[in-house]
Structures are given as C-alpha cells and as structure tokens.
Image (cartoon, rainbow, N blue to C red):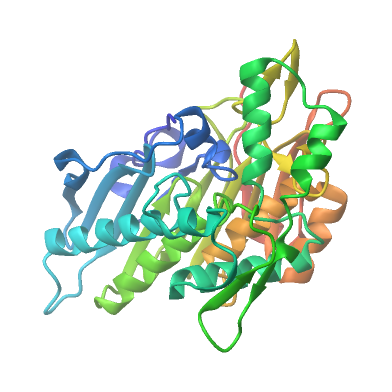
C-alpha cells in the first residue's frame, strides 16, 4: 500500500517552520476500511519477524518535539509525534520502542492470518462454545456489538468468509452465484456470538464464523498507543496510523489541523479539519483496489447484510470527534458502517451516535458531492479548488 509523504506545510499552507504550529496529515482514505484486504492478496501467511521489523525512524523535529515513523501491518504508514515534558521526561528512543511494541502487540492479537494470533484461534472450527479471550479482544468485541446493533448490521466483523469468497471469484473470474452467496452468508453474522459481560469470555454459536477486525482494529491500536503516551507523562502528541489519527494536548497554542486526501487527485487535499483541543479522526474509503471479475468491476467493500459489494458510489467517509466520549475504535467502526449504509442512512446514524461525519460520493451523473453533519461543517475548511 502506497502513501503520500506527510511533509510540513508548504505552498499556500505555510512554510516548513510551521510543522507543529499548524500540523497537517493526509488521511489515506482507501486504507481505512478493510485493511486486511492486503492479507488476501498476500496469501494466508503472516509476515515473518526479522531484525528489520525492530527499526524505526526517530528525529527531533523541533526543540522538545520528537517524531518516530515506521511502516507496520503490511506496510501501512504510521507516525507518532510527541512533546516531552520539560522535566523528568522519558528518553525519546526508549519511548519509541514502547510505542512500536504496543502497535505490534495489538497487531498480533487481531491479525487473522497469523496462526499464533488470538483472532486466528477464534477462527478455527474447533473453537466453539465458551471461550476465554484477552482484555483487548473482549473490549473490541463489545464495541463491535454496540456498532453492529446501532447500524442494523452494517458493521459486522464476521465477514472474513465473504472476503475469501470474492477473492476466489477474482482468481477464477467467475462471479459468485446467488446460491454461493447464500451458502457463505450462513457463516456470517455477529448474532452468532455471545459476549459475557461479567468476565472476559465469549461463546461462539456457529463454529464456521470467522472474524476480520480490519474495520476497527487500527482505530483501537491508535487508542492504545495514545493511552500509553499519557501514562508516560507525554503532555501533547499526535498518533497516526494511515487514516486513523488522534491528537491531544497543546499544539504550541495553535489548532491541530488534519488534511483529508482528495479521492480523485491523490496528491491533493479535499479539505482540512481543525480543533483547538483534542481531536480524533478516522477515514475509510472505497475507490481503490476494485475487484475485476469477468469484465465487470466491483467495489472491494462488502455489505455484510447481503454478501455483495456495496452499491452506492461512496469515495470516502471521514468521522471525527472532539470530545472524549468517542474513541478512535468507535470512529473507525462507524466510518466502516457508513460506507456500507450509504449517505441517506449513514449521516443520521452518525448524528445519533454523537459523532461528526463527512461523506464524499459520486452522483449518478458522475459529479463528486459531499454530505456532512452540521457539526462537521463547523470544523471543516474546503481546500482551494484547482483546475
């Protein structure tokens, strides 16, 4: 997966000295929804750990401010910018090691194609009935349940069988039949899982259910790294994993500014969201990696209620929150759901969830349109349009 370099402001947005006065990140729209699509194209083997995996970039970008960068989870760009406390702060390199260790820990839990992961264990046919799970898995499953119910099934992390079916269709160049889709749908459905409230345990009612947390795990990883930074006494930071971003603390008295990638002109901006205080942002998209089968093109995002690719021409969904009530994991899952639900249902869903949302879509006549919640408008600045 390729990305646009996240460089300091330039041109009309200011000079390089403004990196932390007005910071901007390009959200990688296509990476946000089903990141684990890359697993399908790379086979079922988990990546091998090598000495190279332990390496990361680290530099002091301004007095007291440090940035660490690395490609993780099958080459997804990640970066963390943090301000050290004035006294008794941690060593920046030692802190960076902790940051990347935490990202790796979360990745090992939710990677369904790592045979040693907790997700892979849950996905095995022999795993059924009451099963103990980790604190992290229990938290993500509980939030997934809330999103599944609130979205009427538009968000559902049990879609791995669907993805496998459509990936096989690409290989065979045969569009799945209605019977094949119906048969696969028997293995899909979050109602096949019971989550114990009083203990970290779940009960699988269908041994063929398989989980894929690509629509929520990256947001959860950002949440956990942000919590780690706060525990280490970091007063201000920005955590970015592809389209999942969390910024908190004092940005040298200036707003945090986060750019939304133009879904058509890949090196350009569609707009900017900004906040004087904490901000969490998630972006999911649907314009890359189309499935081409028998001369037809399908979106690579699937509706878990129908087993088919989504139909509305949504190019990208950005969700955000400036309050503490919405985690990045919630925003990540909500953006996933809105892509599936479409604009007419997705915007009211966002408003009922207490979050803001922007939907960029292609109309029937081919024009690009944007629809957003009223709260999003107050934080949003369209990018200057160029010919």
Task: Using the rendered view, name the quadrant where residue 56 is placed.
Answer: top left
Q: Position of residue 318 (x, y in %)?
A: 63, 50
Residue 16 seen in the current view: yes
Q: Position of residue 198 (x, y in %)?
A: 57, 89
The C terminus, quarter of image: top right
For the point 60% across and 45% down, the residue is 33
Residue at the bottom extreme? 198
Instruction: Please say if 7 is above or below 299.
Output: below
With respect to residue 87, does 75 lie above or below?
above
Does residue 147 appear to the left or right of 221 in the view shown? right
Q: Can residue 371 be seen in this snapshot?
A: no
Is 101 drawn above or below residue 133 in the view shown? above
Q: As drawn, is 374 to the left or to the right of 130?
A: right
Query: Residue 331's quadrant in the figure?
Result: bottom right
Q: Residue at x 60, y 52 (%)?
A: 210
Q: Which residue in the rendered view is the most extreme toward the front?
A: 126
Where residue 274 appears, as percent x and y from the top left, is 53, 57
Near-viewer residue (369 or 111): 111
Could you say which is closer to the camera, residue 166 or residue 17? 166
Frontmost residue, 203 versus 39: 203
């Amino acid at each position: 997966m390729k990305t646009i370099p996240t460089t300091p402001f330039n041109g009309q947005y200011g000079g390089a000295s403004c990196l932390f006065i007005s910071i901007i990140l390009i959200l990688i729209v296509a990476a946000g929804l089903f990141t684990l699509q890359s697993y399908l194209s790379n086979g079922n083997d988990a990546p091998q750990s090598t000495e190279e995996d332990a390496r990361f970039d680290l530099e002091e970008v301004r007095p007291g401010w440090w940035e660490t960068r690395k490609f993780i989870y099958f080459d997804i760009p990640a970066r963390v910018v943090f301000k050290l406390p004035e006294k008794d702060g941690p060593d920046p390199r030692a802190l960076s090691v902790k940051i990347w260790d935490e990202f790796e820990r979360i990745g090992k839990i939710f990677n369904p194609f790592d045979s040693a992961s907790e997700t892979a264990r849950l996905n095995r046919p022999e795993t059924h009935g009451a099963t103990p799970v980790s604190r992290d898995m229990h938290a993500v499953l509980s939030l997934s349940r809330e999103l599944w119910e609130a979205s009427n099934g538009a968000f559902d992390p049990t879609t791995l069988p669907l993805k496998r079916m459509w990936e096989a269709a690409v290989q065979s160049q045969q569009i799945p039949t209605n019977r094949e889709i119906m048969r696969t749908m028997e293995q899909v459905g979050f109602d096949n899982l019971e989550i114990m409230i009083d203990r970290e345990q779940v009960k699988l009612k269908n041994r063929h259910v398989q989980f894929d947390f690509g629509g929520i795990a990256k947001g959860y990883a950002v949440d956990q790294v942000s919590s780690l930074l706060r525990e280490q006494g970091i007063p201000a930071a920005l955590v970015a994993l592809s389209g999942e971003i969390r910024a908190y603390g004092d940005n040298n008295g200036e707003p945090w500014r986060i750019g939304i990638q133009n879904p058509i002109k890949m090196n350009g901006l569609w707009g900017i969201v900004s906040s004087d205080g904490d901000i969490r942002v998630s972006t999911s998209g649907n314009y890359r990696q189309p499935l081409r089968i028998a001369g037809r093109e399908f979106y690579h995002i699937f509706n878990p209620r129908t087993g088919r690719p989504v139909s509305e021409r949504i190019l990208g969904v950005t969700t955000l929150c400036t309050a503490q009530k919405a985690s990045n994991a919630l925003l990540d899952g909500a953006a996933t759901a809105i892509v599936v639900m479409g604009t007419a249902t997705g915007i009211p869903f966002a408003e009922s969830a207490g979050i803001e949302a922007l939907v960029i879509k292609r109309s029937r006549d081919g024009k690009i349109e944007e629809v957003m919640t009223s709260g999003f408008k107050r934080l949003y600045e369209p990018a200057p349009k160029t010919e």
